[in-house]
Amino acid sequence: MSDPSQQNPYGQPQQPQNNPYAQQPGQPGQPGQPGQPGQPAYGYPQQPGQPGYGYPQQPGQPEYGYQQQTPPPAPGGYTGDPNAPYGYDPYGRPYSDKSKVVAGVLSLFLGGFGIGRFYTGHTGLALGQLFTCGGCGIWSLIDGIMLLTQDSPTDAQGRVLRS
């Protein structure tokens, strides 16, 4: 049996050479211990001349933490993505180049001719409104109100109309 001072509480002998958390010779450690010069261990004061936490690092050293990023483009501004030139809505759907307000107002005032639906690219609905005079005005009125009040009306490509 080995020395009881060398055993851990679980009855197994301690093996310091196999402990991955033990300080190895040549590693920087606490001040005053042998090893390579480096940063002191956690909780010990910084060496003079080193910047503190939150200050820019010295040239040549990697910077840690959050990197400064460019702010996102303004809503409706060009994002650089050819699939979504006006950005994405909160659900990840691309915005259209068409406006929801313009489509609704066109449908309210010129809905008998299907202009609101021609504007959004829905030519089938627009032709139906044109040939029925906007459903005698009722279809175009309801369509205009729906375009203005709906959360996410889409254009013919399925992109959400901008507000």
Image (cartoon, helix red, strand yellow):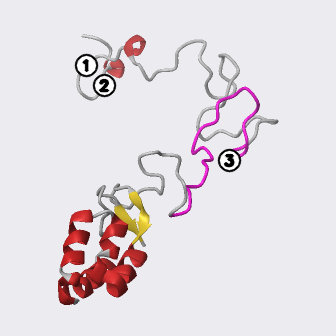
**Among numbered discs 3 and 1, the one appearing first in the sequence:** 1
Callout 3–callout 1 Cβ contact below 8 Å:
no
Q: Disc 2 residue type?
A: Asn
Badge 3 element: loop
User: Residue at the spot x=61%, y=25% of the render?
Assistant: 29
SS category of the residue bearing label 1: loop
Q: Position of residue 70 (x, y in %)?
A: 61, 50
Q: Which residues are the magenta region?
A: 52-75
The vertical placement of 61 against 74, above or below, is above
Q: Nearer the viewer, residue 67 or 159?
A: 159
- Residue 65 lies within the magenta run: yes
- Quarter of image, res 74: bottom right
Q: What's the mark number on residue 8?
A: 2
Residue 118 in the image: x percent, y percent? 33, 68
The type of residue carrying mark 3 is: Gly
In the rendered view, does 32 fall on the left or right side of 94?
right
* Residue reaching furthest to the right: 49
Query: Could you say where residue 32 lies in the image, as x and y percent from the top left?
Result: 69, 25
Local SS, label 2: loop
Residues at discs 1 and 2 in contact (Cβ within 8 Å): yes
49 or 123: nearer the viewer: 123
| Residue at figure coordinates x 51%, y 63% from the top left | 76
Q: Residue at x 24, y 76 (%)?
A: 130
**Foreground label between 2 and 3:** 3
On residue 12, which mark appears?
1
Identify residue for label 3.
Answer: 54
| Front-lying residue, 47 or 64 | 64
